[in-house]
Image (spheres, helix red, strand yellow):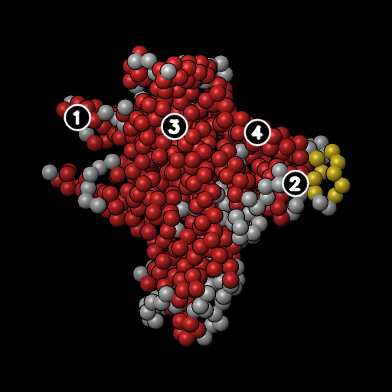
Amino acid sequence: MVATVKGGIKRLTGSLAFSGYWMIAPVVLLVAAFTLYPYAYALWTSFRVASPLLPPAFAGLKNYKAVISSIYFVRAVRNTLIFAACSVPITVILGLLTASLLNRRFFGDIVLKALVLLPWTMPIAVSGVIWRGFFNSGWGAFNALLYMAGLIPKYIGWLTEPKLAMVAVVTAQIWTQFPFATVLILAAMQAIPQELYEAAAIDGAGLLQRFFYITLPGIRAMLAIVVIFETLMGLTTFDLTHALTQGGPGTSTTLISYYTYSESFKMLNFGNGSALAVILAVVSLLMILAIMQFIPKGALIGGEK
Amino acid sequence: MMRGWGIRVVTYLGAVLLAMFILAPLAWVFLSSVLPEASILSFPPDWFQYGFMDANYKYIFTGEIPRGAIATATLRTMISQEVRLVPRTILNSFIVASVVMLINCLIGSLAAYAFARLRFAGKTPVFFFITLSRLIPTVALAIPYYLIVQRSGLIDTYWALIIIYSVLTLPFTLLILTLYFRGIPEEIEEAAQLDGCSPFQTLVRVTIPLALPSLIGTGLFAFMLSYSEFLFGLLITQSIKTRTLPVILAAVSWNPDVTWGLTSASITIGLIPTLLLVVPVWRYMVKGLVAGGVY
């Protein structure tokens, strides 16, 4: 009796699992429902006059024209490019260095591992608040420490000078992002077979040679993933600037995401906001597709197996 | 010999610089939460002239107005009830993030296994569709998401947050778990199937136990992303019933009636769950990632 029931369940689950569709169905349906409809909605809104102040109407490409010709858009794009160009390489390199460091055994390495994870486990909006307190022009710890060390004669307006505010935002961004880069790179490093290093050492390969001929090829796929992820984070940073500078002073740290938010929710111009969102999404998509060429074929799911 | 010493010096120097970079802003937050306002505002800076106090924490938990600040400073002490809501928002965030973690582990692992092992038409395009769906900045989805939630009557409920956070975290869970599952040698599973296990039984009895560390790791990752999410928390939560921690902390920090001391005490309390997560995340996330590569 028990055997037949078990056999029945086995046949049932076996035949259901045969195609694999039922296993992916919950994720696919959930993500698709909350992806296709909102994207379609954003696209539709971008072609319409959508503002509480004006009657709804078809706008064609007017929103796009208005957005692209706006001086604020040009500034936001420039700020975003500067921001990403500074934060992404530094984040990846710092992640690589930190992973190399944590891949070694030394006194206190466990403590350092836990420390490195700290910024990553924290809400980014909260990190923004924390860095705002640290960089504060009037009483922030950074000014106080530099002053006590005798490096500056008077306090510096880290968040009130446009260029310095960008430095502050980039610093905070690196702080929030490099731990995840470290974790991923370190995982890839530790997956490299130890025998390769031993064989290379026997053949007389130095530290740098071992890095360039064994470590780097071994972590290449993971590095590509990290670069994608960090670029995405750099282009779409919202929480951090919202909490740290609110795009200011002036528009000096207004990144494209924050600009999209303020166009939608401060100016209440959903049409323009949606046009911005579509532009940003298309640019991101093109970039991701370009970077994906660097991932070895089949590295993610191994093609049609 | 010299070479070995050089590497050690560089290692420790790097470790110290790294620790300083990570800890500096956090140390400032903790320090500010236990210092009287007059010490924080002093110039030239003398942070320890009036000693330490626990008045900020006392206020958050008991509502007792900080006297230390009044006694030592001529400045008007600024107070807002808002910071007293922080403990409740921690609970809200915790509940939402826990359910999202469960959903990720259940349906995320099923899907990841199918993508890693099974053969079916349209596998690659669907996989890339899901993983790339996270590409569109959340700001772009804010208006449509808000309307969906509003129409289904889920505004200001846990469920709205849980569904949206699941959509936002599942692509990552899927990507990482698929990589893990692919790292587990198929021979182990073939052996199980020779012994009469169905694909589903193989997953439950062989693969999941092998991938358990990775599963916990990605689950905690989903927990963290949900615990930290800001924008949708801001738009969808409208009362203390569901308000999440990042939302209240950002609000407190821009509230002119809240001192930096009170803000930093709120942050310190809000970060306790995060601090508790650091060790398990390291253990399972990293060990899981490594296991995915090795086995």
| Furthest-left residue in this view | B1
Query: Do discs 1 and 3 share a chain?
Result: no
Residue drawn at 49 percent across, 56 percent down? A127
Query: What is the chain letter for disc 3?
Result: B
Q: Name the residue under label 1.
A: A198
Q: Name the residue under label 4.
A: A33
Q: Vertical placement of A58 versus B188: above or below? A: below
Give the number of marks. 4
Residue B148 visible within the image: yes
Q: Do the residues under discs 1 and 3 have CB atoms within 8 angstroms?
A: no
Badge 4 local density, few (<14 within 10 Å), some, or many (20+)?
A: few
Q: Where is residue B113 in the image (x, y as percent from the top left)?
A: 46, 26
Query: What is the chain letter for disc 1?
Result: A
Residue drawn at 64 percent across, 39 percent down? A280
Amino acid found under the numbered disc labelled 3: Leu
Q: Mark 3 points at which residue?
A: B177
* Residue B144 lies in quadrant: top right
Q: Do the residues under discs 3 and 4 have CB atoms within 8 angstroms?
A: no
Q: Which mark is residue B117?
A: none
Query: Is tag 2's residue or tag 4's residue first in the polypeptide sequence?
Result: 4
Closest to the observer, B163 or A193: B163
Amino acid found under the numbered disc labelled 1: Glu
CA distance separating discs 1 and 2: 60 Å
- Secondary element type, mark 4: helix
Is residue A170 found left or right of B26 in the rendered image? right
| Furthest-front residue in this view | A1
CA distance separating discs 2 and 4: 22 Å
The label nearer to you, 1 versus 4, is 4
